[in-house]
Image (cartoon, helix red, strand yellow):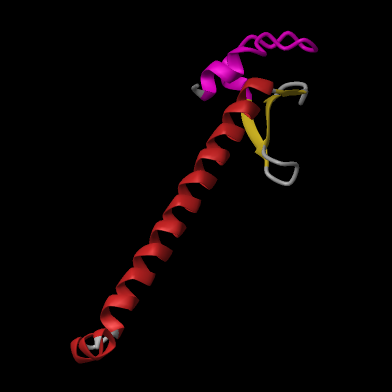
Amino acid sequence: MKIREVISEFVPCEICGNNDIKNFYFHVLVDKGSQPYVKCCECEKEYYSASAKSILERVDELRKVRNESRTTLEKTSKVDLRDQESLHPLVKILAQM
C-alpha cells in the first residue's frame, strides 16, 4: 500500500474540506506502538489509519520471524563448526578406542 493511497482515504478533510492531497502528511507515532496517522495541514486534524496500522504490524511480525530464524541458524552453524574444529583428528581416534 502506498502512502498516497492511505492519504486519499481521508481526502477531503471533514473539518475544513481540504481537497488538495499535497496538504496532507503521513506520520507514524513510534512511541504509541507504531500508530500511523494522516494530518491535514490546514486545520491540523489527525486521522488514524487502521489499514496502515495492520500493514505495519504485519511488517513488524515478519521482521521478528526473519531475525529469529537468522539467529537460530547462526547459533546452529556456530555450534557445528566449533564441534568440528575443536577436536583434533588424533583426539577423535583416541575417543574411538
Place of residue 19 in the rendered image (x, y in percent of width and height, measured from the top left)? 64, 9
Q: Quadrant of the C terminus?
A: bottom left
Q: Residue at x 73, y 46 (%)?
A: 31
Q: In the visual, does 23 lie left or right of 32?
A: left
As drawn, the residue found furthest toward the right would be 15
Q: Is residue 19 magenta?
A: yes
Place of residue 78 in the rendered image (x, y in percent of width and height, measured from the top left)? 36, 70
Q: How many marks?
A: 0
Place of residue 40 in the rendered image (x, y in percent of width and height, measured from the top left)? 70, 22
Q: Residue at x 72, y 21 (%)?
A: 42
Viewer-nearest residue: 59 or 11 = 59
Which quarter of the figure has residue 14? top right
Viewer-nearest residue: 45 or 81 = 81
Q: Residue at x 78, y 23 (%)?
A: 45
Q: Residue at x 34, y 64 (%)?
A: 77
Q: Is residue 13 above or below residue 58?
A: above
> Magenta part of the protein: which range?
3-24
Viewer-nearest residue: 33 or 8 = 33
Q: Is residue 91 above or below residue 82?
A: below
Q: Is residue 73 magenta?
A: no
Place of residue 15 in the rendered image (x, y in percent of width and height, measured from the top left)? 80, 12
